[in-house]
Amino acid sequence: MSSNQIAVFFIVSVILYITGALTSLASFSSSKWSNRLANTFALLASSLLTFLMICKLIYSRDVAININFNTNIPFLAIKFNIDNLSAFFIMIISIVAIIVSLFSYTYMSHYFSKKNIAVFGCLYNLFIVSMVLLVSSSNLLLFLVFWELMSLVSFFLVIFEHEKEDVQKAGRIYIIMTYIGTACITAAFVLIAAYTGSFNFTSINLQSIPQGAANIIFILLLIGFGTKAGIIPVHIWLPYAHPVAPSNISALMSGVMIKMAVYGLIRFIFNILPAGDLWWGVIVLCTGIASALIGITYSIASTTNIKRLLAYSSIENMGIILAGLGIMLIARASGNYFLLSLSLTATLLHTLNHAVFKSLLFMGAGAVQYSAHTKNMEKLGGLIKKMPIASVFIFIGCLSISAVPPFNGFISEYMIFKMIISSISHFAPSQSFLLVLVLMVAAAALALTGALVAFCFVKFFGISFLGMPRSKEAESAVEPGKPMLVALASAAMLCLLLGIFPNYAIRLIDSVGSQLINLKLLATDWSQLPSRYYPADNSILSISSGLIAILLVVLGGLLLLVVMALRKRTSIERYNTWDCGFTKINSKMQYSATGFSKSLRIIFRGFFKPARDLEITEGTAPYHIKAGRYTTSTVKFFEKYLYQPVVSNIIHFSRKIRFTVQTGSIHAYLMYFFGIMVLMLLYYSFTA
Amino acid sequence: MYNNVLNLLAILILISSFTLVANKRQNAYITTFRLQSLLLALISLIISVKSMIETKKFDEVIFIFLLIVVFKVIVIPMAMRKTSDRVEYKVEKDFFINIPISMLICCGLVVLCWYVVHHVEGITNPTTENYLIYSLSVVMIGLFFMISRKKALGQIIGFLVIENGLFLAAMMTTDGMPMIVELGLFFDLLTAFLIMGIFVFKINSTFDSIDVNKLKHLKG
């Protein structure tokens, strides 16, 4: 396809999204129709975009697609430029949007007649289109406009059920954190524009930013985009906003929106800023690893809400992606181009994989909530018998995120491990002892994280889907509707396909790398050898998808044979589980979600400060309890020791200001005018 | 001769604003304001007549003279007197800062204005510089007057004095602004005056006094 055709179809799909938004609004009288229209248009546009971007990445990788509109507004040029990096991210957005739109067909039906579906459909489409335009804009101000649009629209989507108290609180935290992030990004952009004299990406001259300013810009960008990505310690909005948003929105936010931060970091650090010192990479690596480790421990230890668990797990995955980015920066600063290319591939691959399996898991959580009407794991259980098909797909998601082969999570985490190990072997001879130490600690922490992720998802799946139902709601759960199952199935299929044939995804990423850093990792010609080792000349990194597939088939066959062989010799007898002489086994005898994660809370007790409290409501003394209330709690470390002091200081200060400066007296206000005027006059005459 | 007269009138306007600051009773404010407006009207009359004699053409500034006479000398002071008669039934101390100190501060303001205008580049004519000093001083004194008086009438008068100062500056330095600008300014002034007049009644009915300091209680 020529670049003109792609540009035209790109505009068509943007118009489709906007049509979806408008038609959804127009048919506000029928919730059913506005839901259908919004999702159908989103589905159409996203399918078109997915196809378009894959075409672009494969067949026209060397052309950049430019769409320009002239404006009279100073500095703001409406310029869109889709290069391979943008195309890759648009592809992620649209793939997730396809799956989520399918899911929304039935998922939204439980809001019918309760909420305004028309507005939701409108915002849903706007949300997707703002992200698509965000990654394709090539002007700093335009980027900022779409960034803000995305943040605002997602805020309104998060507070969709705004009549609930916890939703309001989550929305408040979300919008405050978002604006802190945007403030940092804006400051960085203003600095960039001040040094380069232009807001357009293309006319920004790398050499004109001095190193000192570049350092400041880098830190500001890291904080700003880090807030959106949810890296620790600016993560606090994530565990609040994700659980309260409708599940399709959580899937989009966690699958796609937080990836926009990754896009921003890669785009600005690699396209705009000059190559920095080594410490840039070390900082990014350290925050990434810390986010990964802390995020996953939070996920296990501090929550029984399935969606909050997934939100913390998003923090963990963003941490891993950021660690990859850190290695990229280290590689760029030290001039190791093979490592740079490898880490870019690993980072982008994990971004894609996380988008797929995290949206699958969030949709799964949505399906659970849809049919069991609760997000609390202590009330779930035994769902695998009630919703068997959905459970299989969610199980695939759990396997993917726990990096179990042959699913996609394995491939990218494996590559990230390989990347860290090969960077250790690169730096080991160079006597930079500290750096090697950092890398080794990072590798160890990443390994620990991997194990904890498995723990976390054993908890997630085991408690919610296995065992006996813990409440009436869980008992009455049913299989969700067909479109939801199709959405879950397609995401699960994608997990499997990306796991078995990662080379196709890597091939897409390779065209990003060849344009962004001018390096091609793949040496062989892909059109001739579709399933060769990757990369061809580097045997330690080889992954053979063909072999994996064969191995899978063989292993599966073997397993089947063993089972068949053993089965013949055993006789099946059905009776109840032995219950130690109790009359009946009930759901209270199972592990609870809190109990299951206790070991971790004890290991990390310095961090979580777990506390328990037994309050006897009926009966005397500890030995004659008739009724009581037992509570366990953990401390939210960052909120308590980082945010609480700052917030209380700000409130204290504002209160003081209110009584001393904002007195309400007209004379005082006039006095301020007068004072400022005299000062300005004096300033003028002293400087003149 | 012409310049001397204008200079004298401008100085008189400045002195009248000092008189205003020295006034203790609210009725006296109105009289002083009326006097100041009359001086301003005289200046506009002299400027317009002079330009008519020189160019033998009709000059629009004469309209300004009429407007000032009608509104600032007759209508606004009358309305204000009515307002004060209706709302003001007790005489009490109206200022935060006592009169002698106020006078000293105003002197300081004039010195400040002189200092500032002296540093403005591009004023070649020394008389223009003087006029600018007088009018800027009138503006500053008007603002100071607004701050130092408690009752709402003080704020209105202060506002009108600021306006007078601006008119003075415009007329003395440019020999009259374009008609349309002057008219716009006048309408602005009238509307502001009307709104403030209404507010005075509102404040009076809410607090039984027009002491604007009591507006503090409105704050949540």
Image (cartoon, rainbow, N blue to C red):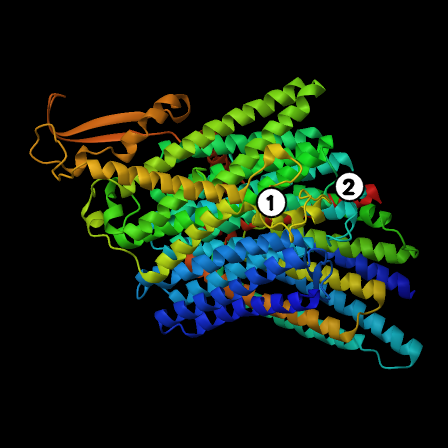
Q: Residue at x 29, y 30 (%)?
A: A596
Horizontal side, residue A606 vs residue A335: left or right: left
Q: Chain of mark 2?
A: A
Tell whether A656 sits left or right of B41: left
Q: Which mark is residue A209?
A: 2
Q: Quadrant of the C terminus of chain A?
A: top right
Q: Badge 1: few (under 14), some or many (20 or more) residues near its Cα, within 10 Å?
A: some
Residue A85 visible here: yes
User: Label 2 is placed on what type of residue?
Assistant: Ile
Q: Which mark is residue A532?
A: 1
Q: Is residue A326 above or below residue B202?
A: above
Front one among A173 and A32: A32
Secondary structure at badge 1 equals: loop
From the viewer's side, name the closer residue of A228 and B197. Answer: A228
SS type, badge 2:
loop
Q: Earlier in the sequence, mark 2 or mark 1?
A: 2
Position in image of residue A576 (x %, y %)? 12, 37
Q: CA distance from mark 2 to mark 1?
A: 43 Å
Q: What's the amino acid at mark 1?
A: Arg
Q: How many marks?
A: 2
The spot of residue A674 in percent (x, y) is: 66, 48
Residue B210 visible to the viewer: no
Residue A411: where, in percent of width, then height?
A: 52, 40
Name the residue: 31% across, 63% down. Answer: A114
Image point 73% across, 67% down: which residue?
A70
Residue A43 to residue A665: above or below? below
